[in-house]
Amino acid sequence: LGLVYGYIPYFILPLYAALDRIDTQVIEAAKDLGASPRQAFLRVTAPMSKQGVLAGLVIIMLPMFGDYYTPNLLSGSPRTRMIGNQIDQFINQTTSQGGQGAALTLVLMAFVAILMVYYLVNISRVTQQARE
């Protein structure tokens, strides 16, 4: 969370620049031709903003790889266990506990995916209620 909080502005800037360059008439034309707002986003806005997304990823990925040890700094104490540190310990130990690290990674990814789906469902529900 600390890495995301620190680097999200560097991702938003190129994304905003790419979205700002999209002509609104193109999106309106897609809607006039029968595209739903979701289809207009997926077929017009997303492809036209792909360069901004890629630029943002390039800008933030290299420094994020450099900040691999940030959880060690954020935890403050060797006794404090953060999930990233635990995965790192499982994978880098000389004993064969790489499977535990992989399992912990999959559990973390599933947890994040569930939270994302929950968020997207709630956003779509709120959007539909706002239209009505």
Image (cartoon, helix red, strand yellow):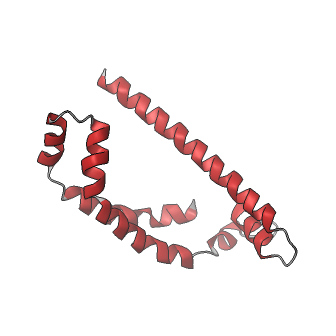
Q: Quadrant of residue 50?
A: bottom left
Residue 81 in view of the camera:
no
Q: Residue furthest right?
A: 95
Left or right for 53, reference 84: left
In the rendered view, tell whether residue 65 sits above or below residue 41: below
Q: Where is residue 29? Give x, y as percent.
A: 13, 41
Give the residue drawn at x 67%, y 53%: 108
Quadrant into which the C terminus falls: top left
Q: Quadrant of residue 39?
A: top left
Q: Where is residue 130? Give x, y as percent.
A: 33, 26
Q: Residue furthest top?
A: 132
Q: How many marks?
A: 0
Q: Where is residue 105? Give x, y as percent.
A: 69, 59
Q: Where is residue 24? Give x, y as percent.
A: 15, 47
Quadrant into which the N terminus falls: bottom right
Q: Quadrant of residue 90?
A: bottom right
Give the residue drawn at x 51%, y 62%: 4
In the rendered view, tell whether residue 6 sits above or below residue 125: below
In the rendered view, tell whether residue 39 sits above or below residue 100: above
**Of 111 and 9, the residue lying toward us:** 111
In the rendered view, tell whether residue 118 sits above or below residue 20: above
Give the residue drawn at x 31%, y 52%: 46
